[in-house]
Amino acid sequence: MSYPITIVHNVFDDPQEILSLAEKTEYIQDTNNVSNTDVRETSLGLDEIYPELYDIVVKKTLLSFYENVDFFHAQGTCYFHRTVSTQKQNSLTHTDRSLLTSVIYLTKNNNHNGLEIYRPSVTHTMNQDDQCLEKIATINANFNSMIIFPGHYPHKPIMSTHDDQYRYTIRLFIKDLCSTPTPGYRIQSFKSTV
């Protein structure tokens, strides 16, 4: 399946509770930092430290594309991520090694930040990363919203200001997705289409 770039608003019923959880979680230095101009840290996997939250994030991501996710099994990683920008960000465009990438924005009044998504192009000039890319979307980091996109799309975070305040997100990288419906479910699905 080819997944479209998708934005979901009002992801959590109580986003302040999730933000409070993110703020009290322990973090370690992000070893995959694509910028030298900010400090990025990640939590341990949410599947380990907050398994119920992990399940909610995976289900909300999959429900953006599928009507029933009860028979799906997603393999991937999901964690809290926090960033503090020490100067205007100049992140490198990169891709993720995932089928789907999902980012949930947890910081209020953070609309000047977000994400740019690109696609390869032969008609555009080289960007700062020596890649020929065409920008296809600019997404604002609206509080309690989620952006979902194919991991192979080149993208980079936007952090247009520096104020020494942490910016919190949840990041999900679905690497593999499989469905194992029961025979009864398959028969019900077949009957409903006949």
Image (spheres, rainbow, N blue to C red):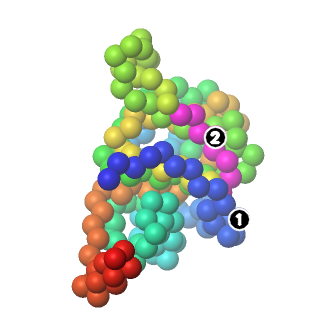
Residue drawn 36% across the image and 26% down it: 120
Q: Classify 30 as above or below 79.
A: above
Decide which of tag 1 and tag 2 comes sooner along the chain: 1
Q: Which residue lies furthest to the bottom in this view?
A: 184
Q: Which of 181 and 141 is in front in this view?
A: 181
Q: Which residue is drawn at 44% across and 17% down?
A: 128
Mark 1 residue type: Gln
Residue placed most toward the observer, 187 or 183: 187
Q: Can residue 138 be seen in this view?
A: yes
Q: Which residue is drawn at 41% across and 11% down?
A: 125
Q: Is residue 3 left or right of residue 19?
A: left
**Residue 159's spot in the image, x, y percent?**
61, 34
Q: Position of residue 60 (x, y in %)?
A: 51, 65
Secondary structure under tag 2 reads strand
- Picture quarter containing residue 69? bottom left
Tell me the amino acid under the disc marked 2. Asn
Q: Distance between the residues labelled 1 and 2?
A: 19 Å
* Residue 134 screen position, x and y as percent: 45, 23
Residue 131 occupies quadrant: top left
Relative horizontal placement of residue 181, taking residue 43 as reference (left or right): left
**Looking at the rendering, in which quadrant would you find the C terminus?**
bottom left
Residue assigned mark 1: 16
**Magenta highlight range:** 137-144
The one nearer the camera, 60 or 130, is 60
Q: What residue sits right under mark 2 in the picture?
A: 140
